[in-house]
Amino acid sequence: MEVRELATVPAMGPLFAKALLPGFGHGPARIPSHTVRLSQVSQDLERLADYDRVCGFTVRDTVPPTWLHVLTFPLHVLLLSDPESTIRLAGVVHVSNQMQLHRPVRATEVLDISVRVTNLRPHQRGALLDLIGEVRVGDELVWDGVSTYLAPGAKVDGEPVVVERAANQSSTPIAQWRLPADLGRQYRRVSGDPNPIHTHLLAARAFGFARPLIHGMWTHARLLAAIEAKLPDRYRVEVSFTKPILLPAKVGAWWRSTGDHWDAAVTTIDGTKPHLIANIQVG
């Protein structure tokens, strides 16, 4: 696969404006065939500290794994704004995320970051695709992640794949969080994600939501932050995004260890409906 080196981090504002343009056309969906890579990326310590605060992490010498996803995200936007892609990031739905932290990553480490798009496949509502990110320090892979998106209306030949829904284990919340109306703006500041459905009422309504919704990756990060002190140096986490959280909101959360893994969820305040379901492998 061709690797295209980038000189700087892509500016997401102009790219997202481009991503708002229709991209499907009438033929089969296409995705870029190349990888994009940023080398020798120094982490912004002030932005990292702000990210930790917004998401509930303890500020420390090592970084949360979800922070490394944030660093890959501009490359997601770039790839789905490429002329080779008929799928645009605006309008797709982030349905699940997997990431693996292979070892603790220090905030002062210089990183090489790459992203590619793969596994375009039919779905009964359109198409699914995976954006695969990797973070290395030198030749060492320290983190990797897979973000799976649903592109409604996209056309891909073949039989639609059957996607198993994450099992919902109803449980009484052991934590309650109040999410303020401006949380989307706070997370936009630290993540750089410019999607207006998280910050503007009219944009949210244009996509069928009564109010702006918080980013799924904030919810993911906030759940990990709640149990970070209980997790080892290396682990794998898989989450399914099941129900958007409209702002402002009050939500519940629970987590429990079952030996070599943790089950966890962010739910409605009564615990009956999940917003996010997580499984964390620590063995």
Image (spheres, rainbow, N blue to C red):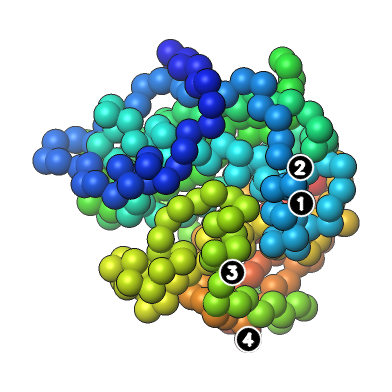
**Residue closer to the observer: 231 or 65:** 65
Q: Which mark is residue 183?
A: 3
Q: Secondary structure at mark 2?
A: helix
The percent coordinates of residue 170 (x first, y second) are 63, 76
- Name the residue: 60% across, 77% down: 180
The percent coordinates of residue 154 (x first, y second) are 24, 45
- As shown in the figure, which amino acid type bears the numbered disc 2? Leu
Q: Which mark is residue 49?
A: 1
Check if mark 2's residue and mark 3's residue have beta carbons within 8 Å.
Answer: no
Check if mark 4's residue and mark 1's residue have beta carbons within 8 Å.
Answer: no
- The image shows residue 184, relative to residue 41, as above or below, that is below
Near mark 4 (Cα within 10 A), the count class, few <14, some 14-19 or many ≥20, is some
Q: Secondary structure at mark 4?
A: loop
- The image shows residue 158, relative to residue 279, as above or below, that is above
Q: Secondary structure at mark 3?
A: helix
Which of the two discs, 2 and 3, sits closer to the camera?
Answer: 2
Check if mark 3's residue and mark 1's residue have beta carbons within 8 Å.
Answer: no
Near mark 3 (Cα within 10 A), the count class, few <14, some 14-19 or many ≥20, is many
Is residue 256 visible in the rendered image? The answer is yes
Q: Which residue is mark 4?
A: 270
Cα gap from disc 3 to disc 4, whole angstroms: 22 Å
Q: Quadrant of residue 252?
A: bottom right
Going from the N terminus, do you reach mark 3 or mark 1 first?
1
Going from the N terminus, do you reach mark 3 or mark 4 first?
3
Residue 115 shown left or right of residue 60 in the figure: left
Q: Quadrant of residue 259?
A: bottom right
Cα gap from disc 2 to disc 4, whole angstroms: 37 Å
Q: Which mark is residue 259?
A: none
Check if mark 1's residue and mark 2's residue have beta carbons within 8 Å.
Answer: yes
Near mark 2 (Cα within 10 A), the count class, few <14, some 14-19 or many ≥20, is few
